């Protein structure tokens, strides 16, 4: 189908965009359009106004800090894949992004768009939770930062106010030598995941788990951290038995189901993906070099 | 009203065009209906099938997910721009040799996706070709001849580029 009529604005600056957003009660931000435009075409969304931020200057930067990497909201998913900074500092995100849709949809799809659309099956929100994301929201009133827990309120529902726009996300860069793994299951490559898992692992000099994150995607309304699995792994040697035990805690977290993947099946997928992600992360982690 | 039709300019296959469109009109529909370039096909209108793929400033995009007004000032390339005069583009020639199309509905999108791939990666592996094509649905060929044609075209294009 075709998109319903809307008023179209294409601001050139952030101030102009925020001014428009403040004055429009029923406006949506148009970023890469790979989720919003299908929704318009299928008439699942019919906002009065679209504010196209594709030509707003300065929203597509990747900035490397000491312990955070900041991604502008309009960084294209394809640019993330190609970025040496992302590959080196955020290997989890690099692996996750390569599994979003298809190369051609990643040419347009953005970091901010994926976060704001907040599809339960989306890769970037799951990776963002694992990477302790701080989301930078701007409005004509000012700027504030939200933790992922404050941002991801529910099924496709963010903590942004109607006059706010996501301008950047700050992700924690884990120390060099950490291991990352992102695994997802979909019937065909590029389909929506039926379960996904993101894992980060850092090991100490003795090969014991020094720090760990395990996050599941596509199993609940929003990405989910499996803190019990993390607690089980901490301070211990992550051999196959321990990884399997920890991954088994993923299954019971599943609350989302649909005819394609009923609860029992999705729970098994979640456990399998958690195991794959953890195994990859452990395998890629170096033992911390202990100073002599 | 900002929802009213507006005049926009862009280049399409190297030709400067101006058209008047409502903001809600997709680039695919503008190409087909306003410019008469019906080579770009529209299958699903929600980004799934890939048949509407065109290049905008050299980047392959779904033209059903881009409003024509968003392409203002850009350079658009469609399947109509591939042939060199009366000679087929090496990709098109390879598709013919390998029988890589049957009904031809998916073909324009497949070709434009491959044009982007071969410009970025002149000697792609089979895996890279398959990855690039993962977003293009073909209900006829089973993909084997398409992949073979893409790899064959890559060698032809590389030979052309060699001094
Ligand atoms: S018509 Fe655009 S992807 Fe199917
Ligand atoms: S040739 Fe018929 S869909 Fe591809």
Image (cartoon, coloured by chain):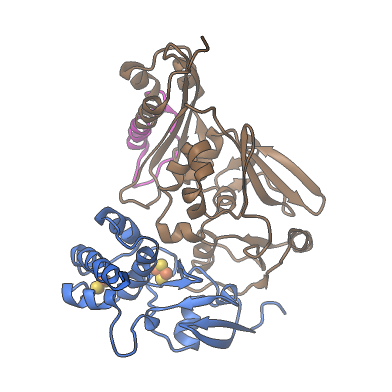
Q: Is residue B130 left or right of residue B39?
A: left
Whole-percent x, y for residue B144 in the image: 19, 63
Q: In the figure, A172 relative to B120: above or below?
A: above
For the N terminus of chain B, the image quarter is: bottom right
Determine if the magenta segment contains residue B11: no
Is any atom of residue A222 visible in this view? no
- Point out the residue furthest to the front here: B163
Snapshot quadrant of residue A9? bottom right
Is any atom of residue B154 visible in this view? yes
Residue at 46% from the left image edge and 56% from the top image edge: A106
Residue at 54% from the left image edge and 78% from the top image edge: B25
Which chain is tinted brown? Answer: A
**Which sits in the foreground, B105 or B117?**
B117
- Point out the residue furthest to the left here: B98
Snapshot quadrant of residue A45? bottom right
**Which sits in the foreground, A260 or B56?**
B56
For the C terminus of chain B, the image quarter is: bottom left
Q: In the figure, A38 relative to A116: above or below?
A: below
Q: Is residue A109 left or right of residue A133?
A: left
Provide the residue span drawn in magenta. A248-273
Whole-percent x, y for residue B45 in the image: 44, 70
Ligand 1 falls in quadrant: bottom left
Whole-percent x, y for residue B4 in the image: 66, 82
Determine if the magenta segment contains residue A256: yes
Q: In the figure, A167 relative to A38: above or below?
A: above
Q: Is residue A14 left or right of residue A222?
A: right
Chain B colour? blue
């Amino acid at each position: 189908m075709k998109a319903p009529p809307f008023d179209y604005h294409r601001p050139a600056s952030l101030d102009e965009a925020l001014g428009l957003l403040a004055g429009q009660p029923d406006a949506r931000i148009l970023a890469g359009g790979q989720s919003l435009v299908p929704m318009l075409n299928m008439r699942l969304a019919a906002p009065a106004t679209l504010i196209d931020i594709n030509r707003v200057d300065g929203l597509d930067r990747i900035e490397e800090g000491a312990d955070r990497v900041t991604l502008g909201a309009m960084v294209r998913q394809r640019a993330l894949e190609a970025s040496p900074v992302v590959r080196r500092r955020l290997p989890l995100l690099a692996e996750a992004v390569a599994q979003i849709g298809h190369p051609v949809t990643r040419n347009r799809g953005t970091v901010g768009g994926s976060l704001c659309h907040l599809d339960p099956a989306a890769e970037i929100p799951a990776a963002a939770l694992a990477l302790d994301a701080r989301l930078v929201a701007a409005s004509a009133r000012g700027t504030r930062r939200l933790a992922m827990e404050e941002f991801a309120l529910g099924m496709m529902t963010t903590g942004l106010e109607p006059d706010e726009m996501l301008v950047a996300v700050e992700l924690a860069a884990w120390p060099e030598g950490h291991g990352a793994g992102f695994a997802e299951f979909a019937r065909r490559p590029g389909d929506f995941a039926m379960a996904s898992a993101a894992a980060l692992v850092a090991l100490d000099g003795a090969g014991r788990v020094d720090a760990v994150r395990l996050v599941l995607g596509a199993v609940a309304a929003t990405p989910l951290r499996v803190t019990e699995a993390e607690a089980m792994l901490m301070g211990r040697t992550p051999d196959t038995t321990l990884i399997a035990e920890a991954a088994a805690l993923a299954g019971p977290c599943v609350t989302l189901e649909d005819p394609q993947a009923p609860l029992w099946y999705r729970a098994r997928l979640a456990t399998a993906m958690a195991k794959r992600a953890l195994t990859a992360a452990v395998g890629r982690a170096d033992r911390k070099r202990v100073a002599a | 009203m900002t929802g009213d039709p507006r005049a926009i300019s862009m280049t399409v296959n190297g030709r400067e065009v101006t058209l008047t469109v409502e903001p809600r009109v997709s680039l695919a529909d503008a190409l087909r209906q306003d410019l008469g370039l019906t080579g770009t096909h529209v299958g699903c209108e929600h980004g799934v099938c890939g048949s509407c793929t065109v290049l905008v400033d050299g980047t392959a995009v779904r033209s059903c997910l881009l409003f024509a007004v968003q392409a203002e000032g850009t350079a658009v390339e469609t399947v109509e721009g591939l042939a060199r005069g009366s000679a087929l583009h090496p990709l098109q020639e390879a598709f013919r040799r390998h029988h890589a199309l049957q009904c031809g509905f998916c073909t324009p999108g497949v070709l434009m996706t491959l044009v982007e791939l071969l410009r970025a990666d002149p000697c792609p592996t089979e895996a890279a070709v398959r990855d690039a094509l993962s977003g293009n649905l073909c209900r006829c060929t089973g993909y084997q001849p398409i992949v073979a044609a893409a790899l064959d075209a890559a060698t032809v294009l590389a030979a052309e580029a060699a001094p």
